[in-house]
Amino acid sequence: MATDQVFIPPPSLSAKFEGSFAYLTVRDRLPTILTRVIDTIHRNKNNFFEKHGQVGVEAEKRAISFLSKLRNELQTDKPVLPLTESGDDTEAWNQYLQRQQDLMEDGQQVSWFKSPWLYVECYMYRRIQEALWLSPPICDFDAFKEAKTHSFFESQQAIISLCTYLREILSTTDATNKKWLLEHFLRFLQVSLWGNRCDLSISAGLENSQKTSPMDSLSDLQHFVLVDDSEKVWSALTSGRGPGGTEETGVRVDVVLDNAGFELVADLVLADFMVSVGLAKEVRFHGKSIPWFVSDVGERDFDWTVSQTAASNHKHVSSCGVQWKRHVKDGAWSYHDHRFWTLPHEFCDMPADAADLYATLQGSDLILFKGDLNYRRLTGDRTWEHTVPFERALGGFLPAPLCSVRTLKANVQVGLEPGQAEKLASKDAEWMTSGKYAVIQFCGPVQQQQGS
Ligand SMILES: O=P(O)(O)OC[C@@]1(O)O[C@H](CO)[C@@H](O)[C@@H]1O
Ligand SMILES: [Mn+2]
């Protein structure tokens, strides 16, 4: 490409492509999720009455009226509307609506079935929050809380086997043996990867917990990892003397979280292993500031999961939870929820639209992005050719060495070998959306490991 040519990225995935996964999501799954939210709020009417009296009942009715209107707008492809309450991100959302409007052709209005899928899907979750913020005193009700805690309790066997494995490993730690460290790091990374299948958005809120012990199936699942940059992740972690890590401060890992339930436990186990064996001195967790994509982690979910684990009647599970409370107390672990994580922007917009967050991430030695939505935002949710290099699709977003740890649940995937996508499509038409395949996809300067 001649240097003076401006690179124009491919179009965004959108429900305007009839029959596409985006189309089916907006037509079928999003209304189903909205209906479940309405049902959940309706089922809690008595709780609202007990807690708040008649005003609680009025609030339930008000929230449901807002949500029913939203569902009608969605199902009849009405124009996307500006937000009306005064949240701290309201202006950012309404500016983004204007940005989308400027992109529309032939004077068309931004709407559910004409605009980018990433935008309208994120917008739906922000409108759900608006409906609650406009219905005091139930503003802080989390309509997804029941599903998230249910998913945690349904995954107990897997949680017990994972926590037991961690405690046994830590009791036989040989932190000087790099081969031993690498072997177990890779296992915990893969459990964190496959934990991403348990997301309640893809299941439209239906039960989607981890029933079996993930440790037992890792070798069978390896075949389904389409890109495995684990060794590059290891290099970034162990030669971690990048911008954030020095001899004094040690290695800092940032985990951009995805789903609560088993996936969060798997992420906390991975983080505990890294800190406990000295691979990392600090882990920063990045979660959501409002309920998001049904099962995504918010601060209350994070705190609840750590406390619930510590209170377990299983000794290895409770040992893990007690240790996690200690990591939080002594500052090795911290939880952050910048509002950018619940905005609709592609991550390549972060330097311009959330410069403070980008600067924070530049201090990391390794950023792990969990899940499918983060992958969609990393790559702009665009119709890239599958062989386009991951770095190209990042569009300049690279605050630090980063890795997407993702099961494929949307039809965007880059960085594949020539012919790899065609081979997969010939075997399995749903290879990009079933959650059966996964990537551990790295990008960043990897300092050459001296003599390792
Ligand atoms: O980010 P996650 O939890 O791995 O997946 C989110 C998801 O379930 O929601 C969207 C479809 O509604 C897709 O991005 C993906 O399928
Ligand atoms: Mn999610």
Image (cartoon, rainbow, N blue to C red):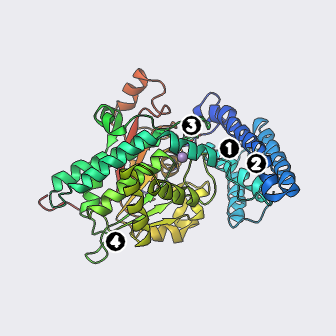
Question: Label 3: which residue?
Answer: 202
User: Looking at the rendering, which quadrant does residue 253 occupy?
Assistant: bottom left
Amino acid carrying label 1: it is Ser
Residue 228 against residue 334 in the figure, above or below: above
Pointer 1 with pointer 2, Cβ within 8 A = yes
Asked if residue 163 lies left or right of residue 36, the reply is left
Pointer 1 with pointer 4, Cβ within 8 A = no
Question: Label 4: which residue?
Answer: 243
**Residue 80: mark:** 2
Residue 61 horizontal/vertical position (percent)? 85, 48
Question: Label 1: which residue?
Answer: 115
Q: Which of 148 and 220 is in front in this view?
A: 148
Among the two numbered marks 1 and 2 on one chain, the one whose residue lies closer to the N terminus: 2
SS type, badge 4? loop
SS type, badge 2? loop
- Residue under the image location 50 percent in, 33 percent down: 433
